[in-house]
Amino acid sequence: MPSGWTMLVFVGAVAVLAITPGPDILYVLTRGMTQGPRAGFIAALGFSTGCIGHTIFAVAGLTALIKASAAAFMFIKLAGAGYLVFLGIRTWLDHSGFEVGGPRRTQEMGTIFRQSVLANLLNPKVAVFFLAFLPQFVDVERGPGWLQLLVFGGLFTAVTIVVFGAVGFASGSVGRWLGGRASVRKAIRYAAGTILVGLGLRLAWARP
């Protein structure tokens, strides 16, 4: 098992990375602003769950395959980009999902969770990041490497839940405050859709 000091340093590094502006936290911020604190937190939970998937992929060696194969990387990248663009267009067209003050149905929260998980898993740059970042903290003298990777992946997920969850909840509170007027809700909806489409296009043009 990793030493306590190594895990402490790892948690600090992940916290800094998590709060750094990027596509994932921007997605969570957008969800919170447009659909309330609960939706922001659920989106954060979805992205964090996606981190578990990337950890498993890294341990199984699938991430290394994606990194080695340009075709596989391109396929997953375009799939993820297309999915984000699809979500952005749906956001432009969705009027009912942006009644900020109204109650949220369980199914809607489940949809946000699934969309967030997929948005994370379909981003190959996150997969490659896990392959490059997690092994730096593995000490072969302290036990099996795969077990340490699982531990670090779990810590990464936990820190992401805390940081992204706080951002999603806070942005949701701000969005609820701003969303009292129909014109503001409309502006937020179009801005959110534009951000999601922009993230998709950014991913599509990103280099490995």
Image (cartoon, helix red, strand yellow):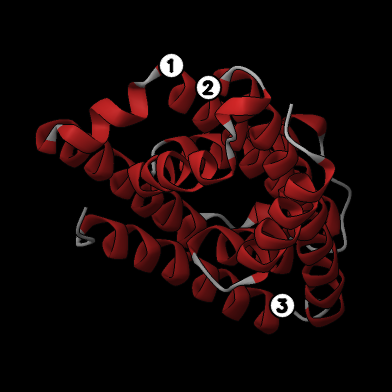
Residue 18 percent coordinates (x, y): 65, 61
Q: Amino acid at mark 2?
A: Ile
Residue 86 is left or right of residue 190, and the answer is left
Which residue is under mark 1? 60
Q: Is the C-beta separation of discs 2 and 3 under 8 Å? A: no
Q: Residues within 10 Å of mark 1 (few under 14, many from 20)?
A: few
Above/below status of 96 relative to 186:
above
Quadrant for the N terminus, please. Answer: top right
Marking on residue 182: 3
Residue 24 is left or right of residue 39, and the answer is left
Residue occupying the point 61% across, 76% down:
188
Q: Is the C-beta separation of discs 3 and 1 under 8 Å? A: no
Which residue is under mark 2? 56
Q: Earlier in the sequence, mark 2 or mark 3?
A: 2
Q: Can I make out residue 42 in this image?
A: yes
Query: In 3D space, how far apart are the residues under numbered discs 1 and 2 (Cα atoms)?
Result: 6 Å
Camera-side residue of 19 and 13 = 13
Q: Secondary structure at mark 1?
A: helix
Residue 180 percent coordinates (x, y): 83, 78
